[in-house]
Amino acid sequence: MGKVKVVNVSRRFIKDKDTSTLALDNISMEVDDKEFVCFVGPSGCGKTTLLRIISGLDSPDEGEVYLDGIKIESPGPDRGMVFQEYSLFPWKSVADNVIFGPRMRGIKKKDALEEAEKYLELVGLQQFRHSFPYELSGGMKQRVAIARALANEPSVLLMDEPFGALDAQTRNILQQELLDIWKKKHITILFVTHSVDEAVFLADKIVLMSARPGKIKEVINVDLPRPRERTSPEANVLRDRILKSLLKEQNK
């Protein structure tokens, strides 16, 4: 399963004894198992901070986060993380990057490599298993990062602007590939993005966040049928609604 519950989470960053920044202010929300949720909001509103807290890489000053009823207090293999930066080990091959997590959990290399083949096939990179990151394009590197996150068989995949550095064509292709992976793996995805178009195309639910300190301004259920047409009248109406809401926050 992959049900996430965030309860009254606040996070303050302290620079010195006289200076601090409230990044998140009393966030509460629930994400259902196998749901695809996108977080959208102005820069600096705490989207990444919230994702890091759910991953266990950061801790709230107040509140709790639960995965399937168990309180999150540290990172774990039940949560995979994909960052905007490719975060690959440059000295390791594609296959060795993918098996890093399973090897850290004590799985024998032979068995881990056999499992890695499934994920490399899933992202279409099995023929590049022996390549190194410097030999790959940006889109291919991000596919490796996704395969590495999936290799631990997480119930939740956390993605922090994973396609933000890619060109528009590659980004659109990877969005569709991610949806295909989501359908095949039946996992929960929490996805941070600055792109309203991306959120409307991908999400079951869009969480709109306010300007800092980050609060949940609105949760929008996206009822558009799949597969979605990016330029359908319904998508355009929803996109316009979200952009107007974001503009109000940015003007603050």
Image (cartoon, rainbow, N blue to C red):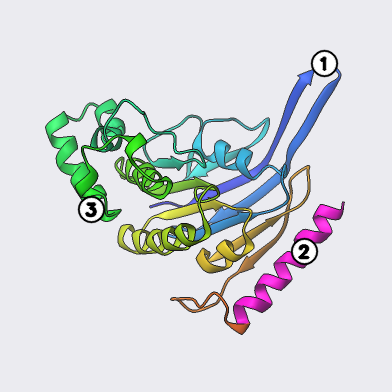
Badge 2 amino acid: Ser
Task: Estimate the x, y position of residue 182 in percent, counting from the top left.
Answer: 38, 59
Give the structural element (helix, strand or loop) at label 1. loop
Does the magenta stretch mainly form a helix, a strand or a loop?
helix
Using the image, determine if residue 215 lies above or below residue 227: above
User: Is residue 237 one of those drawn in magenta?
Assistant: yes
* Residue highlighted by disc 2: 245
- Which of the marked residues, 3 or 2, is nearer the chain's N terminus? 3
- Which of the marked residues, 3 or 1, is nearer the chain's N terminus? 1
Determine which of the numbered discs, if any, sits on residue 195 in the image.
Answer: none
In front of the other: label 3 or label 2? 3
Q: CA distance from mark 1 to mark 2?
A: 35 Å
> At 40% across and 58% down in the image, what residue appears?
178
- Which of the marked residues, 1 or 2, is nearer the chain's N terminus? 1
* Residue highlighted by disc 1: 17
> At 20% across and 48% down in the image, what residue appears?
127
Task: Estimate the x, y position of residue 242 in percent, counting from the top left.
Answer: 71, 66
Badge 3 amino acid: Glu
In front of the other: label 3 or label 1? 3
Task: Estimate the x, y position of residue 228 in percent, counting from the top left.
Answer: 49, 76
Q: Are marks 1 and 2 in contact (CB under 8 Å)?
A: no
The residue lying furthest to the top in this view is 17
> At 25% across and 32% down in the image, what residue appears?
96
Badge 1 amino acid: Lys
Q: CA distance from mark 3 to mark 2?
A: 40 Å
Q: Which residues are magenta?
A: 234-252
Determine which of the numbered discs, if any, sits on residue 121 in the image.
Answer: 3
Q: CA distance from mark 3 to mark 1?
A: 52 Å
Callout 2 crowding tier (Cα within 10 Å): few <14, some 14–19, many ≥20: some
Give the structural element (helix, strand or loop) at label 3. helix
